[in-house]
Amino acid sequence: MRTSTRHTATRNRKMIDSIFTASVFALCALLPSPSFDAEGQQRGKIARIGFLGGSSASAYSTNLEALRQGLGELGYVEGKNIAIEHRFAEGKDRIQALAAELIGLDVSVIVTSGMPAVIAAKKATSTIPIVTAGADNLVEAGLIASLAHPGGNITGSTRVDADFSAKRLELLKESFPKLSRVAVLGHGSIGGDQEELGEIQTAGRKLAIEIQPFPTPDPSQFPSAFSEMKKKRAEALIFLGSSFTLAHRKHLVELATKNRLASMCPNAGWTDDGCVMSYGAKTGELFRRAAVFIDKILKGAKPADLPVEQPMKFELVINLKAAKQIGLTIPPNVLARADKVIK
């Protein structure tokens, strides 16, 4: 009798356990469960993206809008599943401190523009992924192993301004056949500026054009640099592309106009501000492509395995209004090749 009672008690406990377990599963089925995407990442989590630039917010406004559009096309919305933290050096010597600030915010990815920014980000972290939206020769600078296999934590797009430099000088010569003296203004730093200047000097020798370098690492040197250009009878001016010149773009274009110099600039943003001509990569496209890299990284890809891209879309932009303002006439054959003409 006692044995039968024990068996009955055991059966009752098992029945109670089964009913309890079933109830728990039923309750869990009623509760909302986390949603996952195809790669197994939990949705609803906001990823923090850092942007580091050496120039000002206004200088990057168009390009940052291209980045947001690119992210939007991939399903990312600020405040919903991403947050973008911006840091702008405004052309001042504080980019390393700003890189450290972004690291402290626990960002998932850092987007950079220009060599000073990518170098600063690399010094600040060797683990957080860095996506460049336009930089100079990353391989030569020792920042990546190769374009195809970057290694480390950097990927994105190069800007390769040095590769365009000879073409910019050729376009100036074609536009103004009697051209014989061209000034070149930039920060003068070792790296992108020196490489680009070297290409211009090589092209200058072939075209019988005297190249006059004007390294100006401080904005206070701008007036004296333009006075010296006048003394040396410079007929045209090439601005080197960097975060430094970008930060002072409007002022530099105003000085070129005031001194009646045919100016050749890195990209369309400069011609919009009054530069006579520009030739280079479509920078907005580089920022849009940065969104693709960000998407892949947030889904688990490693920067080391993502090949660095080179620009595929280039444009020649001519500001006829700016040319007429300083008494210049652009030949019809050059105008016909322009992707955009500002009248």
Image: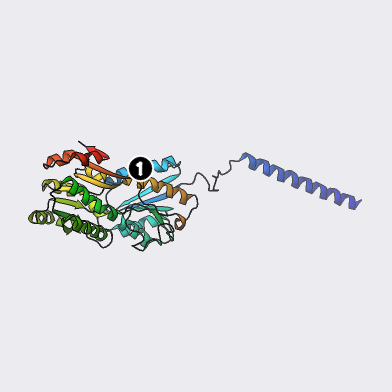
Above or below, 78 against 156 in this view is: above
Q: Which residue is mark 1?
A: 66
- Pick the front one: 245 or 210: 210
Q: How is the image coloured?
A: rainbow
Q: Position of residue 248 (x, y in %)?
A: 21, 50
Say which residue appears at 13% left-offset and 45% top-offset.
257
- Pick the front one: 282 or 20: 282
Say which residue appears at 18% left-offset and 44% top-offset.
276
Dividing the image into 4 quarters, which one contains the C terminus? top left
Q: Choose top left, top right, bottom left or bottom right for residue 227.
A: bottom left
Q: Is residue 59 visible?
A: yes
Left or right? Give the position of 314 relative to 308: left
Inspect the image, locate mark 1, and give the three-letter code of the amino acid beneath it. Ala
Q: Position of residue 23 (x, y in %)?
A: 70, 42
Left or right? Give the position of 287 relative to 328: right
Q: Position of residue 166 (x, y in %)?
A: 24, 53
Badge 1 marks a residue whose secondary structure is helix
Q: Position of residue 194 (x, y in %)?
A: 24, 61
Q: Residues within 10 Å of mark 1 (few under 14, many from 20)?
A: many
- Pick the front one: 254 or 147: 147
The residue at the far top in this view is: 343
